[in-house]
Amino acid sequence: MLISIILRDLWNYKLLILLLMVLLLSTFYAIVVTYENRVLVSKYNHLQEKKELLDTHWRHLLLEEQTLSEHARVEYIAKKELHMYRPHPLEEKVIKVVKDEK
């Protein structure tokens, strides 16, 4: 008897109950989406920092490659085109320059 009264009363407010359930579900969904968004933003920031570190490392490697290739090119031209060579230690002559102090 009491159950039938409760069910009849709930049936009269079925639209209100449905709207309440939709409200609760959308609230929980908003919480889940916000949490996932924060996790993704955190991962994105971490990947951006890693990308910046890798970019810096890449620029340093490019500079090093450029420096080494310039030296190798100069050495190649000196040997092949100008027929220069590195002198033997016995052929080296050291010249000391003395400045006059006044």
Image (cartoon, rainbow, N blue to C red):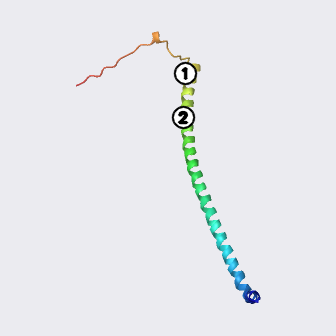
Whichever of labels 1 and 2 marks the residue nearer the N terminus, that label is 2
Give the class, few, some or many, for how many residues have Cα within 10 Å of label 2's Cα (few <14, many ≥20).
few
The type of residue carrying mark 2 is Glu
- Residue 11's place in the image compared with 26, above or below, is below
Q: CA distance from mark 1 to mark 2?
A: 21 Å
Q: Which mark is residue 64?
A: 2
- Residue 42's place in the image compared with 71, above or below, is below
| Residue 39 in the image, given as x and y percentages of width and height | 61, 59
Quarter of the image holding residue 66?
top right
Total tally of numbered discs in the picture: 2
What residue is shown at x 70% (from left), y 83% (from top)?
17
The type of residue carrying mark 1 is Ala
| Residue 21 in the image, given as x and y percentages of width and height | 70, 78
- For residue 10, side relative to residue 59 (left or right): right
State the quadrant of the N terminus.
bottom right
Q: Secondary structure at mark 1?
A: helix
What residue is shown at x 59% (from left), y 61% (from top)?
38
7 or 23: nearer the viewer: 7
Badge nearest the viewer, 1 or 2? 2
| Residue 68 in the image, given as x and y percentages of width and height | 55, 30
- For residue 9, side relative to residue 68 (left or right): right
The residue sitting at the top extreme is 90
- For residue 92, side relative to residue 37 (left or right): left
The residue sitting at the front extreme is 1
| Residue 75 in the image, given as x and y percentages of width and height | 55, 23
Q: Secondary structure at mark 2?
A: helix
User: Which residue corresponds to mark 1?
Assistant: 78
4 or 96: nearer the viewer: 4
What residue is shown at x 72% (from left), y 81% (from top)?
18
Quarter of the image holding residue 12?
bottom right
46 or 71: nearer the viewer: 46
